[in-house]
Image (spheres, grey):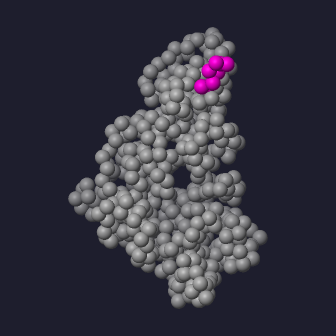
């Protein structure tokens, strides 16, 4: 199962350069550093933000007081030299020379491959930078405006390449000030997207598509109305993905997706989609809500990406501190589907630097967090094999705390595992009916892969009554049978 480690490439190389006392690019990262990236169970590395950033976009950011305030919040001594511009304001899909260029990326990919790791990179289907070549050379690939539009609504339109275009946006927020909107209904744009993704496929093993739902026919049409023109008969991704995979059959497609559009995007060709609903339920709802979410079709769940943080979300150490965060991490690490870990999450970092920055604040390592993840990742790799099944805890008339427990099993020909998590701040007890029909007549030893304890249980009792569990607030077991 896919386990992704996201790395903010620009910040990561900057920190390595400071630590090693020399400039470090993708082409000369030391082997021992790649070894630290290749953690147990991780099979995919996402090098976020490798493409050429836009000088024009950077200048817009420097004039945006709201953005500058967010930079100062994270980095009080921020200077212009610390601001590189957004990695999602792409000037060209060529690896930035400051990061090592295409040759550096190729060397990094080779280093990852020798360690059994795949590489995925970003693609932004919704917009490009104002100084991208297309506004000047291919206006039919963008959503166009007029001089009157620019005068009437300068926050929504921008002059680029000598013409007026709409600024990039999604339907629920103001336009992004530093990007130009692509026209997802344009046949020329769709063909150019195929060629760009084929080029990315020449350099990587997968692609993470930013805000992938924005270019779906119905979403794009509702966002842009008459400016979009007539919707093609075929949706955007069913047109693009098969043509790319004709050239790169094994290329992994990952969608950043919201608004419950994950099933539609899976049907349109994506291998994995963000599971934002699980993230929200773990942060804001209870175990009943999480359990209901996990009742979805298993094939659908295998296509989800489970996460507790990424470069768009606050750090898990702040939103899910301490024992609660560890319990949530055990859950996402041992569920079916893909798992996404974010650089710095293992060390318990609390500050999420804006992606515009090339330098972040110095933070001490949380040794307890590092030790916990050092045990969790190999345990999760051992557990997630075979068939997954969610369990329904049972309780007693005078004790309803069983409702706070989440539980599931993994059953393989040569291994059985049980995961139990108390998703609450009170102690909880339950009986867990087990799915195995050969328990009777044996003593069973359960070993906790995280806590190290062992438990001997009678098979007849397990078959008749289920396994009794009692967990402290935010407690968990990862039990190997």
**x and y, in percent, of residue 322 in the image:** 42, 37
Residue in view at x 48 percent, y 37 percent: 324
Residue in view at x 56 percent, y 72 percent: 175
Q: Is residue 276 visible?
A: yes
Name the one closer to the observer, 159 or 335. Answer: 159
Name the one closer to the observer, 229 or 428. Answer: 428
Measured along the vertical axis of the image, is residue 34 above or below residue 155? Answer: above
Residue in view at x 47 percent, y 19 percent: 454
What range of the chain is rendered magenta? Answer: 395-402
**x and y, in percent, of residue 112 in the image:** 42, 53
- Residue 237, quarter of picture: bottom right
- Residue 286, quarter of picture: top right
**x and y, in percent, of residue 56 in the image:** 44, 78
Was residue 401 drawn as part of the magenta stretch in this picture? yes
Q: Is residue 100 visible?
A: no
**x and y, in percent, of residue 138 in the image:** 59, 83
Q: Is residue 279 left or right of residue 355?
A: right
Q: Is residue 322 left or right of residue 418?
A: left
Was residue 266 drawn as part of the magenta stretch in this picture? no
View extreme (right): residue: 233
């Amino acid at each position: 199962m896919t386990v992704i480690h996201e790395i903010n490439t620009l910040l990561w190389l900057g920190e390595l350069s400071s630590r090693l006392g020399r400039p470090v690019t993708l082409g000369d990262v030391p082997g021992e550093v790649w070894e630290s990236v290749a953690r147990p169970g991780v099979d995919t590395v996402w090098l976020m933000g490798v493409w050429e950033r836009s000088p024009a976009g950077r200048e817009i950011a420097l004039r945006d007081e709201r953005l500058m305030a967010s930079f100062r919040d994270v980095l009080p001594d921020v200077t212009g030299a610390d601001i590189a511009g957004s990695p999602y304001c792409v000037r060209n899909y060529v690896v930035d020379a400051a990061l090592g260029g295409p040759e550096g990326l190729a060397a990094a990919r080779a280093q990852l491959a020798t360690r059994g790791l795949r590489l995925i990179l970003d693609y932004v289907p919704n917009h490009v930078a104002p100084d991208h070549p297309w506004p000047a050379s291919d206006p039919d690939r963008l959503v166009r405006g007029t001089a009157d539009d620019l005068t009437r609504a300068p926050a929504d339109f921008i002059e680029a390449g000598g013409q007026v275009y709409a600024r990039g946006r999604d339907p629920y927020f103001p336009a992004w000030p530093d990007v130009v909107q692509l026209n997802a209904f344009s046949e020329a744009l769709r063909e150019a997207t195929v060629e760009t993704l084929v080029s990315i496929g020449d350099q990587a093993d997968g692609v993470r598509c930013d805000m992938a739902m924005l270019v779906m026919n119905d979403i794009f049409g509702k966002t842009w109305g008459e400016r979009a023109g007539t919707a093609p008969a075929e949706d955007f991704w069913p047109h693009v993905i098969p043509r790319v995979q004709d050239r790169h059959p094994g290329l992994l497609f990952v969608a950043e997706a919201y608004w419950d559009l994950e099933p539609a995007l899976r049907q349109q060709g994506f291998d994995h989609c963000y599971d934002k609903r699980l993230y929200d339920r773990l942060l804001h709802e209870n175990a009943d809500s999480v359990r209901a979410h996990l009742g979805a079709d298993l094939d659908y769940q295998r296509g989800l990406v489970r996460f507790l943080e990424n470069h768009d979300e606050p750090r898990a150490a702040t939103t899910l501190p301490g024992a609660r965060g560890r319990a949530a991490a055990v859950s996402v690490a041992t569920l079916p589907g893909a798992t996404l870990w974010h650089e710095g999450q293992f060390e318990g970092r609390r500050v999420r630097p804006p992606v515009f920055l090339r330098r972040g604040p110095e933070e001490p390592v949380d040794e307890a967090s590092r030790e916990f993840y050092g045990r969790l990742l190999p345990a999760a790799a051992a557990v997630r094999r075979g068939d997954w099944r969610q369990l329904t805890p049972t309780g007693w008339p005078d004790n309803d705390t069983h409702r706070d427990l989440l539980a599931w099993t993994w059953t393989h020909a040569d291994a059985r595992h049980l995961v139990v998590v108390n998703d609450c701040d009170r102690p909880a007890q339950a009986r867990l009916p087990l799915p195995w029909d050969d328990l009777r007549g044996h003593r069973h030893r359960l070993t906790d892969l995280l806590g190290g304890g062992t438990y001997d249980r009678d098979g007849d009792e397990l078959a008749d009554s289920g396994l009794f569990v009692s967990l402290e607030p935010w407690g968990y077991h990862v039990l190997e049978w």
